[in-house]
Amino acid sequence: MEILTHTKPVKSVRDGLDFFGIEPAQGAPTFVIDADGKLHALILSAARGHIDFKKLAKLLGAENAELASRRRVESATGIPIGAIPLTGLNMPYVLDASLLRHDYVYGGTGCFHTTAKASPQELIAINQIELFYE
């Protein structure tokens, strides 16, 4: 995994796609999901455009899944929305299977002035990912 430093803050998926000149399919924002009260980190392809929460709940073995509230995310991680990292959170990670088609994807590091460039295989190993969102 490579950490890319930039002087311009990247606070959204659109900021990152524009700054790095990459296709949406390589953008990999991390969302914190509340599944029946348990938090999970979902690394999703920016090309997907939405999360099917019913499908995600089923994958996670939960009745319900939704985006965790801003307050809960920041309380649990200490990181602001928009900078949630591809690695390092103390919760299970789920990876969008469509990201496996790319050599590298780009996502958060916990800081608006750095971006992680990682292979999906690195993310699987570092985060011990066992669940894949289809």
Image (tube, rainbow, N blue to C red):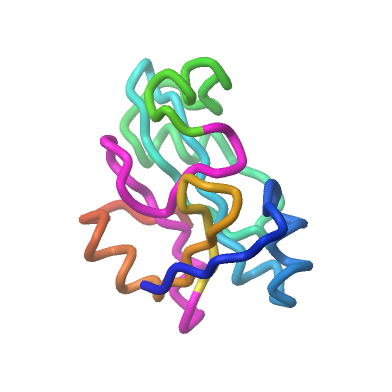
Camera-side residue of 69 and 4: 4
On the picture, is 45 further left or further right than 50?
left
Main secondary structure of the magenta stretch: loop
Location of residue 47 in the rendering, given as x and y in whole percent from the top left corner:
68, 62
Q: Quadrant of the N terminus?
A: bottom left
Total labels: the figure holds 0
Q: Is residue 122 above or below residue 108?
A: below
Where residue 54 appears, x then y in whole percent?
A: 53, 33
Q: Is residue 83 magenta?
A: yes
In terms of image quadrants, where is residue 35? Answer: top left
Q: Nearer the viewer, residue 64 or 17?
A: 17
> Left or right: where does residue 110 sit relative to residue 83?
left
Q: Farthest residue in the bottom direction?
A: 103
Along the viewing direction, whichever of 108 and 30 lies nearer the viewer: 108
Quarter residue 125 falls in: bottom left
> Which residue is rendered at x = 70% and y = 67% of the image?
24
Does the magenta run of residues contain 8?
Answer: no
- Left/right of residue 85 with respect to residue 45 in the rendered view: left
Q: Which residues are magenta?
A: 80-104
* On screen, residue 29 above or below 77: below
In percent of width and height, residue 61 lies at 31, 32
With 127 as the anchor, is 133 left or right in this view? right
Q: Position of residue 48 (x, y in %)?
A: 66, 57
Q: Residue at x 35, y 52 (%)?
A: 87
**Residue at left 34%, top 36%?**
60
